[in-house]
Amino acid sequence: MTHTTEILKDANNKQLNITREFSAPVEKVWKAWTEAEQLDKWWAPKPWKAITKSMDFKVGGFWLYCMAGPNGEKAWCRVDFTAINDGQSFDATATFCDKDGNIDKNFPPMYWHNQFMPTMSGSKVEIELSFDSEADLEQIVKMGFKEGFSMGLGNLDELLAE
């Protein structure tokens, strides 16, 4: 079964609220979000690929990866984990950076709150993506976040069906 990604913009609260259901148990979806080898298989919208340089999934740890494009482009990102409720939720701050994890101040930080819940047919992920300002929110939306993230979640559907 193919699911759709719902992304609602809440400009007043400087947030994107994202909901996606999956036909897989929470435990499997949680692993896909928290293990580097799983993330590399779905995180990037095709034909791009996510390539993990390092990942330490614990509070105070971070995931350093690049989105590698078909023509050799590389966009580096760093995700710092700020709270983890194992199997249920985690919070993180995502930023663009260089290959060594040094933050690029030209792009706004994104504050992720991800919740994982069982449903009758599998699981649901609810994400609150918050920004420091409405302008920061608009900058990320204009970069194609909605389309790219929806494509990535579609890749996750395929991975979970394997």
Image: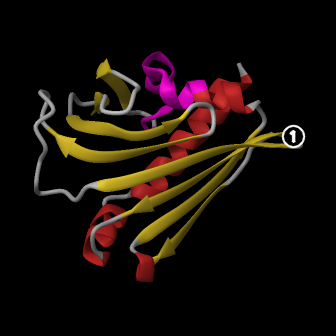
Residue neighbourhood size for the residue with mark 1, other residues' Cα within 10 Å, grouped as few (<14), some (14–19), many (≥20): few
Magenta stretch secondary structure, dominant? helix
Residue plotted at (89% across, 43% down): 120
Q: Position of residue 52 (x, y in %)?
A: 32, 21
Comparing 115 with 77, the one in front is: 115
Q: Which region shows up in magenta?
A: 31-45
Q: In this rendering, would 48 be left or right of 5?
A: left
Query: Disc 1 designates what residue?
Result: 121
**Residue 151 drawn above or below residue 37:** below
Of the residues shown, which amino acid type is indicated by label 1?
Ser
**Quadrant location of residue 159?**
top right
Instruction: Name the outermost residue toward the right.
Output: 120
Residue 14: x %, y % from top left: 39, 73
Determine the image quadrant of residue 49.
top left
Residue 98 falls left or right of residue 2:
left
Look at the image and say whether residue 35 sits in the magenta stretch.
Answer: yes
Residue at the bottom extreme of this rendering: 12
> From what the image shows, is residue 123 above or below residue 99?
below
- Residue drawn at 33 percent across, 65 percent down: 131
User: In the drawing, does residue 134 fall left or right of residue 105?
Assistant: right
Residue at 40 percent across and 56 percent down: it is 145
- Rendered position, 74 above or below 18: above
Give 21 or 27, whichever is nearer the viewer: 27
Question: Is 155 rendered above or below residue 112?
Answer: above
Q: What colour-coding does the image apply? A: secondary structure
